[in-house]
Amino acid sequence: MDFDLSRLEKFVPLSQTFFEAIQKYDENSFMFAVSSPEYRIIKHPSSCLVLGRSGTGKTTCMMFRMIGLDIVAEKYGHPLRQMFVTQSRTLARKVRSYSMQLRQTEANAVGVQSGETLHGLSLMEMDENAEEEGVLPARFSDLEDSHFPLFLTYDQLCRLLEADYELQFNPSALFSPISHGTKTLGSHLRQPLVSFDYFESNIWPHFDERLKKGLHAALVYSEFMGVIKGSEDSLNKSRHYLDRKHYEKRSRAHSGDDTERTRIYSLFEAYHKLRPPASYDVADRVHALIEAMREHGLKGQYVDFLYVDEAQDNLIIDAALLRTLCPNPHRLFFAGDTAQTISVGSAFRFSELKAFMYRLEREDSFVKRGRRKAIDPSFFQLSTNYRSHSGIVNVAAFVVSAHKPVFFSGREERSDFVRLISDSESGNVQLGAHQVIIVRDENAAQRLEAEIGRVAVILTLYESKGMEFDDVLLYDFFTDSAATPADWRAILLAQHDGRVFDERKHSILQSELKSFYVGLTRARERVWIWDRSGNGREMENLLATSLLATTYDINQSVPQLGASSTAKEWAKQARQYFSKSLYGEAAFCFTKAGMNWWASVALAYGDRQVATRLPDKHPRRLSAFSEVAQNFDRLAQASGKSEDPKNALLLFTNAGECFAIISNHLSAAEAFFRGWKFTEAAYHYRMQGMFDEALDVIKTHPIDPEVARSIEYAAKLVFSRKHDVQSLHKAREICESKDEFLEFLQDHGFEEQRIQFLESITEHEEAAAVFWRAKDHVEAISRFLVSTKPSSGAKAAECLLDGLRFNITLGFKRENALPVVSKLLSMDQQLPLDQKQQLEVSLFQAIVHCRADELLAHGRYYINHEKSHSAFLALDAWVYSGALKGLEVEALDQVAALLLVCQQYCNLVQTVIQRPDLLEKPEMQQVFGISWSSNSNADDQDMKPYRQVHPQSFIYAKACDKQPQIDEPVTAPTLSRDVVDDLIRNTLLERRNQVLGAIHFYAHQSRALNPCTRFLVTGSCPSHQTGQCRRGHIQQSVLTIQSFNEVFRLHLLVIALLDQVTAVEDASKTTQTNRSAMQRTWLSRIFDACYPESHKIGNLSDVTPDLIDGYASLIPILKKWLQEVFLSLCLSNDLPFFLSNLLKTSMLATSVDYMDTRRYLLNGKWFADQELASKEGFLQEDGRPIAGAVLTWFNRRTGSRHNLGVYAIRHILGRKLPVDVDVLSSYVEEVCGQLILNHFVHYMSYGYEGLTMPRSWIIRAFMRQSSELSNGRMPYILIPWLRSFLEILIGRLDPGQLRYRGTPLRQSPLPILIVVRVCRCLVMLGVNNRNSRDEVLRAIEPLKQLNSAPDPGLNRLIAAQGWKDVEDAAHLTIASSTLDALVTVTHTTQPSIFPTIPGSRLVFCNNDAELLRGLLMDPHVPLAAPLLHFVQSGFMGQGTPLQSGFSMVPSPQVDEREPAQGAAEIPGQLEGIEYTQQHIKSVRTIQSLFRRHRRRAGGPIAAAFEELVKRGLKLPEGYRPGHFLLLCLRGPLPHVLKYLQKLKDACQETISSLNKSLELSKHEELDALNVKGAEVRRIRDETNKLYKELQPSSELYFKGPETAPPSVAEIVEKVNLVSDLTNRLRWLTELPDDEDYDLGVEPLLSNRVPWRSNKPGMNDTSQPTLDEVHV
Ligand SMILES: [Zn+2]
């Protein structure tokens, strides 16, 4: 729409009232008459620049134009956004109110008041600093149509825009405390504003005197702002100001003095160094805004029309900013008066503005693209006699053309001057309200006032800016000038004599003429020039000769220029001064007008101005503000009833501000409250710590919500910290709900207060819950007990158990128990426990009181009920209760029961070790005293990476050692899951080893496993009576094949248990030796059981698998042990025990599993050590090891093996090698038995008819089987050696290295039982082979030495005279056994053709099976009974099924910590995607990066991603993840996730430390902490969210064939947020550099990775490559 005002006339006849109203508006010299030039301007259809001195009607033109346009727009129903901008707040306000009245007038035809209100003067309108509320919105973008037409200051406009760009400049000279800390972090409040006042009082004095010599602060400041920082060229400089060269070059065109420019620029540099760091000046502000708008564009709507009044007060660059707001080139209106160039901060020239607008227009994008023509504003001059000028001379000409000043001659006398300024009517020395004396500067003003008194208004040139008076008296202008008479004369000479004017030489005149012009133009009517020196004479001449000035000779008479004015005139003038901030002058005028209160107000303003100008650290500053504040307060209270009440409000506000500056918060609060500034009042009450009052204000008055929130937050904290119920309830009142308050307390760690509060509102159950959460179970239960809620009883019971579980963990030590444990245990009677709970409590009681029986019962119960955690707890306490000592008893069943429980305990340990998932179960965690770290998110399904170890835990001490931070003691160390779980596993293993050690110890002592042979043989044991014999004393009558097998089983059980002794970490070596020692010990024990000295107790032949519970699972362990020990035997290590151990293990192993043993039988290490073997006699004559001969005897395939057996015995006895005689005799028995069987197989034609041996011998002989070859001479070779053996045993021959039961034989008592066994061998050889009987008789001859023996058979042999006696003794050697007996085999029931041995039992058999049956005393097959082929092949593999959960075979353990080697490698070709050379190169870069760091992410995260990858690869084509995605999932992403975890932790830590600070800090600091805390919580929440989005189980990845895989770009986008979050957190806390960040986030965001290289514009070669970043 084209808004053409020329239409206005046609369609909208303006009313006469309207014109009258306009004409009445003479305020501030805006005299208006619609003259034709103005009318032209108003109607001009496009933009204009209007130049004119004040009073020429520029403002009125604009106002009229605005109103007219609005009227047109209303007709069209199209509201306009018109904006009027000026520098002066009073002017803006005045124009606004007048404009509104005009509109009213136009609408209602009501007469117009002038600017005064009904109540008289409005302080608000006069006070340039006062701010009105509710007129403007907070942001430019919030402006709505209803806000227009908008009249505002340039400062207000900037603030609106800044709010949109989150820039914060505090423009007030008064420090603004409220905006501190309540804003968002990251944006920074900049203050103070370096205004000219600030510059002059705080910076100027510090400048180097030499530099500033002869320069005026105002001039320098103007150059800084107007030229260096504020000129058009500064816009294109990166630092937003001209460099020195540019400035000096540029200024040369305008002013002549080179050194001056150089000095000014040096001062400028000093200025930047001297000003406070956060400070800013007007130019900084504009540059910041222009930059923000360039970057983000304008937020909000453009304005339709823009009017800028007093444009000369702006910087040139302001025009650029303003023009952006109104892009329509037809709708701009700039008005100004460049005549007033002395205005500070402006080196503004209208011509420059014009040129600038011209260039801006040509830069317009539409113009540039030729979319429209460039439109330049029309230029109007409202001052008709003004003409443009160039050069000094023309300026002078121009100056005088405007005014005809009066010079005085002969005017040195003070009295003349006094007369001059007196009133001709009254004769008083005084000037009128519209008269003024103008002097050069402040000093001159003070001098003059001292001379003449306070009789007139004296202004400096600078102060007079922008004002006009009827009469002006320029006082000592030339006297105080820096220019010399010669300078002035130069003008005269140039003008009159046509001399060349040297501008450079007289450059001073440039500013001097300007000042002169300003002085002259202040006058509307008359100008007088009173100068006491003659310096002005040249100018006077110049002007006078041009008839441009007159000279008055006061030597004749002195005129009286003074006038008197009415009070009204004075008041009016006072207001003008007031609004120009000339408070002293205002006060003077108010006094003249008789308005004393107002005069005081003006003086108070003046005092404030003085105080404000004091430097910050000035000693008088505080007292000055304090005085001012009190004055404002007093004046406000003294405000008359007739005054506008708003005046008092403003004064109170002023008082409040001044109190605030000196931090007198209480007075500030009260003053603000009285001034209706409630936000400030509340704020300062809060700063005073008066939270009740602050909250009261918030409750009852509208205040800034942000400030209210911050106060409420601080109040909540402060009240909560007070720790008393009343304060807590006050804090509660602030919250919207109880729950919100409880949440607040929880969030800030106020647990005690939370309880206190809950109890105060009788929420005992919730208070209890808080205690419970804090693990204070006793308190929690006591609260539950007080509670009347029906649910409380059950909760109390559950809490009790939770408390017991928490405090009584595995490895509970009574002596370390906290008092809380006994307290908890004493509470059970008061609580309604159900049966299960009672049972559990009794478990804990049993643990605490160490009641073994109860523990055992609990252990069994919980195992049966599959509560492994409770069972574990019970059994662990049981094994450590000393119950294992019970293994020492004699009763087999008791020992068996104990061993079984031990086995169950070990199984539990094994299960925990093997199943990592168990440690994820809360009940198991309680057993071990650990929990998930509170940092870990419980919802996090993928991984819970951290665990907390409580002090009760059995790994606590170790965990504390592993805790990395040592600087602060931690009550519960938090460690990664892997570390904690490893600790638990290792510690459990150690624990189990301890238990097994105890089992080893006690079982070794066990009477049940260790029968007293003496008691067995003789029926009495003297040491038994005295209690010294610790062996088992078993009556012969109770020995059965069952009891024997039970003993055997007990051995197996012990072995199976001890087999679990495990190497734990560093202790591996000792554990290994322990294991080996234990093995040898227990193999010896089981050998002793199988080959006992006494025949009465049962032996290997009685081992019956069917009678042994769990045989099939136990026997492999025995086999393993036998093999391990057998193969470990080594002559050099085991020399004294080598043969014994070799015999023991080989005899047992070949018996237990011949086929298996045969495979390793000859693989021992003894072959290697020839030298030692030879030296020690372990080699046969042919050089072969004797061990080979010993062992080859077992090998059934060796045809002549019986020879080797005999040779072995001969060699051992001949060399008297170190061997235990009991072991050797067992071997001898076996060899003899086999020789006898062999004899029958090869020599006897009647089968086994007549075979006579002890039952056990027959069984074993059949087991060893006969040899292929016949005996030959072997028995005859053996018998003499057996005689030697006897001689050795009874001490007739030197025993050599032979031992008995470990001690050298020569130190042992007579081993009578061995003697019996050797004799038995001889007797059996003779009984079965009649040809050897003579040899046998000879062999037993040495026995005669003994005279008598405790053994009946032996006694008979000692006494034997012939074979018959020997035969009679045969059965006696095996007599009195319930298990063994002498047996004779017969095939028929007919009497044998052979004479029967007396006392032997006949066993009838026609075949092997019958023999077996006949030998048995039991229907079960003995172990050593491979008499039949089917037996041999059948029974070993059978046996009873697995018992009671024994599971000895460990399942293969998967170590997740080591990902498969080469998982990082990317297969060369994947799913047919085409790769460019560049892609492949990028992939290689990444791979080599990870290789170089040798750090692919490990642990569960990487594993989870690897799983994901595997899953992805199985997906059908099209849904399968691509190459780069895979690379991303395997390489950097696990690191990103790990890093996010760390970030989460860092947030949590920061929150905790903030909570701590909150607890301790002063209330003044709370706001900042609150802002920080809120930000950290935001970061934490966003991090959690991001973590969830990126974790392997996230929806983001491929879930199946329905969803396509994500693009890598999507992932990269999310990872971008990681870097943002990191940066944000860095503002708040220190974050160390992180390797996972470098390996995860960096590569993904790097520009050289493959997924980035395709993006246009991103492939910038200047970017660092991946290599450069990481190397
Ligand atoms: Zn005994």
Image: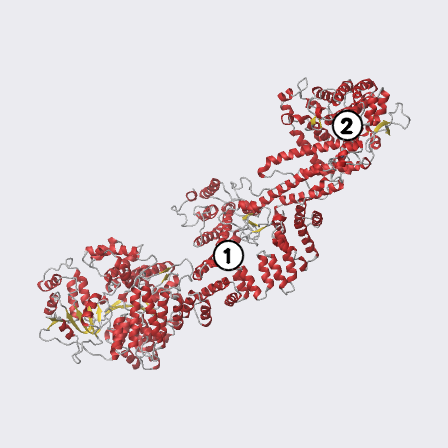
Residue closest to the eye, 838 or 619: 619
> Could you say which quadrant of the image residue 316 lies in?
bottom left
Residue at mark 1: C-beta within 8 A of ligand 1: no
Please indicate, yes or no, whether residue 621 appears anywhere in the rendered image.
Answer: yes
Q: Which mark is residue 1281?
A: none
> Could you say which quadrant of the image residue 1177 lies in?
top right
Q: Residues within 10 Å of mark 2 (few under 14, many from 20)?
A: many
- Identified by mark 2, the residue type is Leu
- Identified by mark 1, the residue type is Asp
Q: Which mark is residue 1313?
A: 2
Q: Residues within 10 Å of mark 1 (few under 14, many from 20)?
A: some
Image mark count: 2
The quadrant of the picture occupied by the C terminus is top left
The quadrant of the picture occupied by the N terminus is bottom left
Residue at 45% across / 64% down in the picture?
A: 710
Q: Is residue 1302 left or right of residue 206?
A: right
Residue 17, image x, y percentages: 30, 81
Mark 1 — residue?
Answer: 1581
Residue closest to the eye, 917 or 599: 599
Looking at the image, is mark 1 or mark 2 earlier in the sequence?
A: 2
Measure how far apart labels 1 and 2 are at the Cα level.
Answer: 84 Å
Residue 71, image x, y percentages: 34, 76
Residue 1003, image x, y percentages: 70, 38
